[in-house]
């Protein structure tokens, strides 16, 4: 018997068989694979930027001028513009600064300008109950307000 015939011989085959490939990495569960929900402070920050900032600017500009109608129209136009942005891009001015985005809860897609405007007015329900609906994201598993639940939206981090 020669060394080439002996399978245990160190002088045998120079090309050993390849080692098996490692198993593929496990995929995360579906609950971990989705977008990260925005915390309440980020939601509050974006709302303050969208609402309180412009209100203060309008109040300073129109204070004492008797231009209440102009102030009201400017505030309304700003609100509609921001809802349009929110529906078409997922981010109003405040959401862009705060780093959040509004998406449909079913598939993570944009909700569209019309539904974003409707959602804004559905927030009246959050306000009617002593503004407690706006605090619901503090205790809700999906961090949704009542308006979010009705319209089917989520606020996520970007």
Image: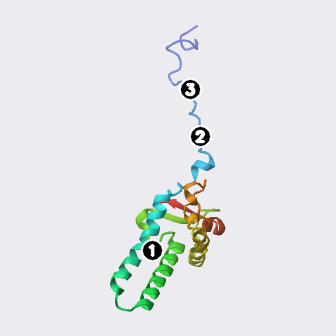
Q: Do residues under tags 2 and 1 come within 8 Å of each other at their CB atoms? A: no
Q: Which residue bears the numbered disc 2?
A: 26
Q: Nearer the viewer, mark 3 or mark 2?
A: 2
Which label belongs to residue 134?
A: none
SS class of the residue under badge 1? helix
Identify which residue is drawn at 50% across, 65% down. Answer: 101
Identify which residue is drawn at 58% across, 14% down. Answer: 7
Relative image position of residue 119 (x, y in whole percent): 59, 73
Figure disc tally: 3
Q: Which residue bears the numbered disc 1?
A: 51
Task: From this view, report whether residue 111 is shown above or below residue 141.
Answer: below
Task: From this view, report whether residue 28 is shown above or below residue 136.
Answer: above
Marks 3 and 2, the one that precedes in the sequence: 3
Q: Which of 121/33 is in front?
A: 121
Q: Alpha-carbon distance for marks 2 and 1?
A: 44 Å
Q: Which residue bears the numbered disc 3?
A: 17
Left or right of residue 102: residue 53: left
Left or right of residue 33: residue 94: left
Q: Label 2 neighbourhood size at 10 Å, few (<14), some (14-19), many (20+)?
A: few
Q: Which of 17/59 is in front?
A: 59
Left or right of residue 14: residue 61: left
Marks 1 and 3, the one that precedes in the sequence: 3
Relative image position of residue 8 (x, y in whole percent): 56, 12
Marks 2 and 1, the one that precedes in the sequence: 2
Relative image position of residue 78 (x, y in whole percent): 45, 81
Task: From this view, report whether residue 58 is shown above or below residue 22.
Answer: below
């Amino acid at each position: 018997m020669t060394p080439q015939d002996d399978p245990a011989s160190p002088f045998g085959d120079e090309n050993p068989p390849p080692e098996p490939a490692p198993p593929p990495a496990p995929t995360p569960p579906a609950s971990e694979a989705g977008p990260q929900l925005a915390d309440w402070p980020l939601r509050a920050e974006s709302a303050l930027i969208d609402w309180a900032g412009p209100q203060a600017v309008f109040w300073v500009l129109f204070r004492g001028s008797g231009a209440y109608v102009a102030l009201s129209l400017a505030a309304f136009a700003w609100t509609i513009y921001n809802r349009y942005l929110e529906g078409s891009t997922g981010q109003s001015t405040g959401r862009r600064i705060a780093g959040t985005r509004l998406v449909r809860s079913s598939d993570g897609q944009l909700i569209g300008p019309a539904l974003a405007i409707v959602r804004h007015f559905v927030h009246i329900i959050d306000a009617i109950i002593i503004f407690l609906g706006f605090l619901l994201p503090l205790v809700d598993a999906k961090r949704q307000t009542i308006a979010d639940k009705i319209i089917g939206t989520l606020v996520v981090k970007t």
